[in-house]
Amino acid sequence: MKKALTITLAAALSCPLMAQSNQVFVIKAGKSVSINTGTPFEQKEIDQSSMEFVYDYRYMTDTTDLSVTEDRMTLQVGNGLSKFSSYTAMRIDSLIRISTPEQITANPDSYVGGEAFCIYKNYPKGRITVTDKISTDWFLYEEETPVMDWTLSDSTCTLLGYPCKSAFCDFRGRRWTAFYTDAIPVPNGPWKFGGLPGLILQIYDEGQQYVFTCVGINSQAQKAITMPDVPYNKTSRRKFYATKRRCDTDPIGYISSMNSSAQVKVEIKGPDGQPRTDLMSPKDLKYDYIERDYK
Amino acid sequence: MKRLCTLLSILFLPLTLCFGQEKEIVGTVTDATNGEPLAGAIVQAIESSAYTFTRDDGSFSLSAETQQVRVQSMGYRSVVVDTTGCPLHIQMMPEATQLRDVMVKAPDILQRSDTLTYAMNKWAQPQDRNMADVLRRLPGVEIADDGSIKYNGEPINRFYIDGSDFVNDRYGVATNNISPADVSSVEIMENHQPIKALEGLDLSRQAGLNIRLKEEARARWIAILQGGLGGAPLLYDASLFAMRIAKRWQNMETLRLNDTGWNPNSQSQRHLFNGAFDSSPDDYWSDDISIGTTSSPIDKQRTRDNLSLLAQSSNARHLSDGRDIQLNATYQSDRLYYRNASTTRYLDTAIPDFVEQNKMRSQQHQLSGEWSLRQNSHDLYLKDNLCADASWSQVSSQVWGSQSLCQESDCPSFTLSNDLRLVRRLDRRLLSVSSQLRYAHRPHSLWADSASQALCADDLRSYTEARYGWMLRHWQFYLNSSLDLNLHRLESYLRGLSLPDYPIEADKGFSVLHALASPEARYERHRWHLSISLPIGYKHYGVANRLSGSTLRKHHLTLAPILYLRRQLSAKTDVIARLSYSLLPVAPDAYTETVVMTDFRHLMLQIPSSKDEQRGSALLQLRYRNPISAFFAHLSARYALDHRPLMHHQLFIDNRILSTYVARSNEVRNTQLHGSISQGLLSARVTIGVDATLSHSQATMMRQDVEQPYSTVDFAIIPKVSGKLSNWFSADYHLNFSHSQYSVTTESIKCNTLRQDLSITLLPTDRWHLTLSAEHYRTRFFTSQTARITFLDTSLRWLISNSIDLTLSASNLLNCTDYQYSTFGSLSESIYSFQIRPRNIIAKVQIKV
């Protein structure tokens, strides 16, 4: 059973750190996540969605022992723009809103889960915006809507009752196979994918290290498409991946360095509340990111 | 001239664009109602795979070899237009695009990393009274008849309630009492390593099971009071179960008194957790005196005429920093009356059949207390467990048939044991020390008419094991060493029997020393797990005969290499192969060399051998699980071959049977195939499954100085289905067909048994539950005779409120009184007949607070 670890920042100098004490850090499946037990952030509405597609997102967190992490994602398609984000994370955010800091600190395992990244396509116009959280920090980068050089193929299959055709493309270090349906004339798909003459219902890379599968379709989903209104660190895609790698391989080092000016002592506790010293040293990632061209 | 060429090319350019081999199709797409340009519409060539999207101004250009294009956009009717009138002006009519929506349902089994979660709101049904009822239905989970839980063919290695394992290995009390209404989910933690210091090092193949309580059931006392009265004869059943699971304190208290056939063992029994670092040495000495311990394949509740009491208290306090203190105490008393009859045939015309009728009364008391202190953290595991057990068992029986006599046994037993285990992890090194100290005193006696047997054993055992390990990148190396010292004193006196050729008295002191060194290497990479261990030991036997004053010393070398290989074929499938060999001396109890009377008919005489016993075994196992489709399967094949220096020898002396050994090497072969599949269907409403086992064994024994090879073949198949077919109707059905064949040189005997269980529950409203159940048994004996029995039971439950319910149940409506079945023994076949509890009715009230 893999459980979450809690990291508390104990202040060596107590007074200036009061603001930091409302952060609970959790490392789970090799990822460091922080929960802000203080006031939850605001959301700003950027569009209204008209359709919603639900995807199961599965990726290997250890390509040697084939352990996988799964999440449920939603693709909200609005008037021109779309948002792809984790349904689990959205549910946990609402849970944090109704919980007290004591409840969260007592049982941090229940307050983490779900992918932190959000992908806003055609926002701003002609570009995509990606937001993600590394440790306590929110990051944002924009890029031109990526061009995927799709090769359409004749092979077909049926997914969720829709006839699908397949297409291939090489994109940022992985070879992808997509199944799209022209019965849904929405040139969109999970993650950054799109640009096919129909909605992508399933897509996976060679080796199936990353798999997105559509499991739900709601054509009448009138909901607000929102974006967290937080101070983002604006960066570029490559710099973002470099930072993420630094944090994922050495979460403790990353947290310590981020808080080094404040002289904090990092204390790590396991799910049972006992201190752990074995996690202080950096570890190699047992998987690679979905985009491999950052190195 | 140059100008003319330029002019011509400009004039003909549109023509080449529209009619060339690969032409450029250009145009605009607008909304037919307001003329607004449509952005993002899909323009796709019909005869080729080319496609494009319209820009913000509705324009597009597409290079393709096609006569027609199709234009599609969400919210507009699709159109197909000819490309002849290039550039194209396409107007689209708004029309709601009808999509077939697909609702997302939560999966029946949720998988998060290596934890599978079965949500109770999906898997529990209204008629389920306790967690055992629900666990039985979960695909991949099996509950054996003794209450032990298995996951995909392997016994679980820990049982937790809200993350606390305070009930320890007596989890029957939890599964049989916790109400599914208080539980939010059942979690199976695959490859569970309960010792945190070994996490990531020692990958367990077994799973842990956690019962996660609902938020409202935590940190408060939950009590279930039950009282029932019925007839005839007078029946009563009273129980109290109280539980409080909080972060610091965990308590579970049980008290039950009843005479309705319930077996207190179902709750008090220990289900041993065996893991790599939980190894405990085999017990060399067994209890020899045993009378009246035949059990029937029929549900024990139907045959037991009992008066039972069970009081159990499990408490734990969680201290800071991963330390726990646990205190468990159990008292159990069981008084039984029963009658049975048997006819034994010895497959030999020279030996007459033996007819026995038995009227028995037994009284058993058990008291045990357990205290443990534990620290389980990532760098240190420390557990000290102090356990005191006392039991008294008195049996008296009246026997008639081929022989008429009375026999009586008195078998008290006192045990005190302390277990200490320490695992220390220092970065890339590991040190583990475990020590067990146990003292047992067992003064047993047996009287059968004029003969009497006194058997008094005192046993002191000290076992110490140290283990040191280094961890490299993909390799782990361990050096294990252990010292096992056993001091045993045995006094055995057999009186009132004349056996001039055999020793009937013994007063012996045994000392057994076993020193073992075992290097071990493990390799783990690319989904391969390999482990090789080579235990080499020295064993010393010292036997002091106090009657003759002589002393015997024996030295032996022991060897037990094991090769283990595991390959994770995919996330869902793994395959395991295990090869083992062992070279061991005969067990020290062989040096008792005195005749012991085990019951009025059976005598036993152990004799030693200086030759070693060799055992070899091979195992191949395949496991598959797919939690998304709720499908679980496992398949295993096992082969074992033993070379024994001593052959079992059966001698008929007057009307007694002496089981002894002769120094003659012989082989015992066992082959077993086992497979099981289970599948959850229709979003957890139906579970189907089938278990099948085929086993074959071959051995040789001696009877009256004649060697007789024999073999057995057993086959069993158990299909089962359980499900809720509608909101008001659910049914459980399982069938168990078994076929046994026992062959000796002269004849081959066969026996078939069939058991069917059908239970139907009707829920006309949420408050009323009516259950009808039928059990059918059929046994076909070797004589082609057939015995059949059918039990019909019914119960009606009325849930007055969420906390009070009334149940009226009637069992054995057809009032069957007698049941027959057949078993095979050592070159013999017995037909047993059991008395069944008569028809009875009981009314119960249950209050939950």
Image (tube, coloured by chain):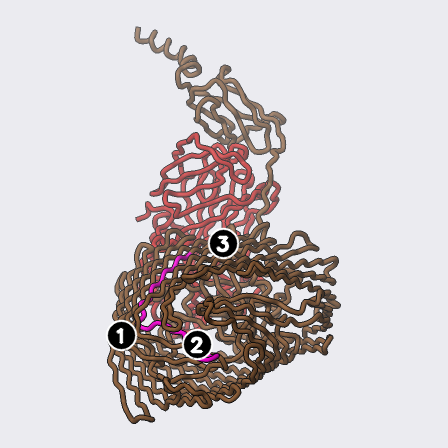
Counting from the top left corner in percent of width and height, residue A58 is at: 45, 50
Q: CA distance from mark 2 to mark 1?
A: 27 Å
Counting from the top left corner in percent of width and height, residue A81 is at: 52, 41
User: What amino acid type is highlighted by mark number 2?
Assistant: Phe
**Left or right: B148 in relation to B231:** left
Disc 3 and disc 1 on one polypeptide chain? yes
Marks 1 and 2: in contact by CB < 8 Å?
A: no
Which residue, as the protein is rendered here, is positioned at the far front?
Answer: B350
Q: Chain of mark 1?
A: B
Q: Which residue is mark 1?
A: B611
Q: CA distance from mark 2 to mark 3?
A: 46 Å
Q: Which residue is mark 3?
A: B677
Question: Range of the magenta residues?
Answer: B636-657
Residue at left 38%, top 77%?
Answer: B660
Counting from the top left corner in percent of width and height, residue B129 is at: 64, 67
Instruction: Give the number of the mark in front: 3 or 1.
Output: 1
Q: Which residue is mark 2?
A: B652
Q: Nearer the viewer, residue B325 or B677?
A: B677
Element carrying mark 1: loop
Within 10 Å of disc 2 (Cα), the crowding (few <14, some 14-19, many 20+) is some
* Chain painted in brown in the figure: B
User: What amino acid type is highlighted by mark number 1?
Assistant: Lys
